[in-house]
Image (tube, rainbow, N blue to C red):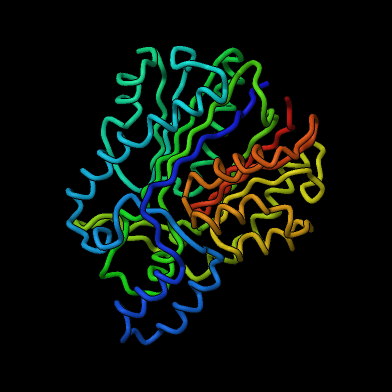
Amino acid sequence: MAVLCKPAIAVPEYIITRDDTLELARQLHDDHRQLKKVLRLIEHTGVVRRHLIQPIDKVLEHPGLDARSAVYEEESKARVPAVVRKALDQAELDPQQIDLIVYVSCTGFMMPALTAWLINEMGFRSETRQIPIAQLGCAAGGAAINRAHDFCRAYPDANVLLVACEFCSLCYQPTDLDVGSLLSNGLFGDAVAAAVVRGRGGTGVRLQRNGSYLIPHTEDWISYAVRSTGFHFQLDKRVPGTMEPLAPALRAVAEAEHWNAGDLDFYIVHAGGPRILDDLCRYLGVPPEAFRFSRATLTEYGNIASAVVLDALARMFDEASAHDGQRGLVAGFGPGITAEMALGTWTS
């Protein structure tokens, strides 16, 4: 069975704290009629600091979509290779042993995808398959794991590289003044993550089953309006309550494996915000400590979109608390509203 090995994570050097964010909101939106509500929501995100690929004054400038696209390409090429090399080292593989690259990002666009550049620049074989995923948002981290698992079930000796490159700061829109947009300005951060799924061998989460679930008729709850100025993030106020309809889907995937979703040894889930994690505790019947890895990601990096699940998983590796045979759940949530879910057992 395929094994998800230890992820590698890198966050950029520019830092903005929660206090910085609150002060900026006061300065930029002092006449906003719902400013007090926005400030309260930002304070309650649990985010203490976030990392950005540019200084905050550059982020606030918004030079246009063409300039931002150039920054996305330049920064991804500068930052992704080191993370990929670390992930390969941690999986004890080299580029020639990779059969598929799954690249996920919802914060910039390139064609051909960065996968083509990586294959040429980092010594991957020309036969390496490519799956770029651009429109699953925060759920794409879970989707990348699941598509790698599917590939390794079809080709049991194959190895798959996963890459998540999210520069959420490039989606800042100074003219978007609704509460959801202002909240997102205090929630999202930038990060690059990578991991390897090995068809044979490896230490980590042995993947056993995966599944997807879409809540009907919620496709406009999390979305982008694509305009000449770029991606305009749109967040419906009903999104924080989506764990109630998604919890049964998590339970159903676990029950298909004859597991109880409320009685597992580890949980790696997307940390969209504290309400998501609090509701999952309630609907699955697990203690808050179960989501400590996801909470730590949210606190230290903010919502780093598709990279969250890989960062949270890396934190579990670092804690070194997992034992052979322990069972767990990995899940990403995003636009659709979509859940990408995987079950696995720890193996060393």
Q: Nearer the viewer, residue 173 or 19?
A: 19
Where in the figure is residue 294, as x and y percent of width and height? Answer: 61, 52
What is the quadrant of the N terminus in the image?
top right
**Residue at x 55% of width, y 51% of height:** 333
Quadrant position of residue 164: top left
Where in the figure is residue 130, as x and y percent of width and height? Answer: 40, 24
**Residue at x 52% of width, y 54% of height:** 337
What is the quadrant of the C terminus in the image?
top right
For this view, does 206 lie left or right of residue 216? right
Where in the figure is residue 121, as x and y percent of width and height? Answer: 31, 21
Please count the marks in the image: 0
Q: Is residue 27 above or below residue 249?
A: below
For this view, does 38 lie left or right of residue 26? right
Q: Is residue 83 above or below residue 69?
A: above
Q: Nearer the viewer, residue 337 or 279?
A: 279
Q: Is residue 91 above or below residue 223?
A: above
Q: Is residue 292 above or below residue 331?
A: below
For this view, does 130 lie left or right of residue 340? left
**Residue at x 60% of width, y 66% of height:** 241
Q: Nearer the viewer, residue 321 or 252?
A: 321
**Residue at x 25% of width, y 39% of height:** 74
Where in the figure is residue 275, as x and y percent of width and height? Answer: 61, 66
